[in-house]
Image: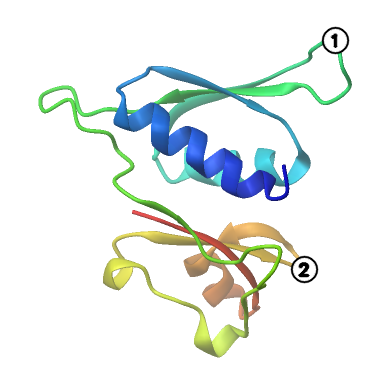
Amino acid sequence: MTDPIADLLTRIRNASKSNHRVVDIPASNVKKEITRVLYEKGYILKYKFEETDNKQGQIRIALKYDSSTKLSAITELKRVSSPGLRKYVDADSLPRVLNGLGIAIISTSHGVMTDKEARVKNIGGEVLCYVS
């Protein structure tokens, strides 16, 4: 696997499109931080880090759906920066997703955060993905 973040996003996207309640993902520190941001912003119901036989462990994510329409809280997950083409932005040119209705997840020198938090702290970084 050359891009573990794209694998995380693809697993979440596929599980939500097929209306699964839970998805298991191999863990890493960046994936844990992305999961934390998705939970804090209300895109997933809950998550849990589990230890496995190998050292890597896994992340178990409970996906969030609307109770009346059965639609997923996540409508779009898009990978922006890839291992072959990194996308870095400074604090002045941070992206806005759906005119502020979605979030961009940014990896900064102060940790993984949303575009809005990075704008408040006036720091730039690598744009990992767009979530709406």
Residue 96: image tag:
none
Residue furthest to the left in view is 68
Q: Quadrant of residue 90?
A: bottom right
Q: Position of residue 115 (x, y in %)?
A: 50, 68
- The alpha-carbon separation of the residues under discs 2 and 1 comes to 32 Å
Q: Quadrant of the C terminus?
A: bottom left
What's the mark number on residue 109?
2
Q: Residue furthest right?
A: 55
Decide if residue 53 is on the left or right side of residue 40. Answer: right
- For the residue marked with disc 1, what is the amino acid? Asp
Category of crowding for the residue at label 1, using alpha-carbon neighbours closer than 10 angstroms: few (below 14), some (14–19), many (at least 20): few
Residue 49: image x %, image y %? 68, 22
Q: How is the image coloured?
A: rainbow
Identify which residue, 93 or 116, lies in the foreground.
93
Secondary structure, mark 2, is: loop
In the picture, measured across the screen, residue 107 lies left or right of residue 20, that is right
Residue 89 percent coordinates (x, y): 60, 82
- Residue 99: image quadrant is bottom left
Instruction: Locate residue 35, reporting x and y percent.
Output: 57, 39
Which residue corresponds to the image point at 67% horizontal and 38% vertical from the top-left?
A: 32
- Is residue 85 shown above or below 28? below
Would you name the residue on which mark 1 appears?
53
Looking at the image, which residue is at 66% across and 73% down? 85
Q: Which amino acid, by three-letter code, is at mark 2?
A: Ser
Residue at 39% x, 74% y is 96
Q: Is residue 72 left or right of residue 104?
A: left
Q: Is residue 25 above or below residue 127?
A: above
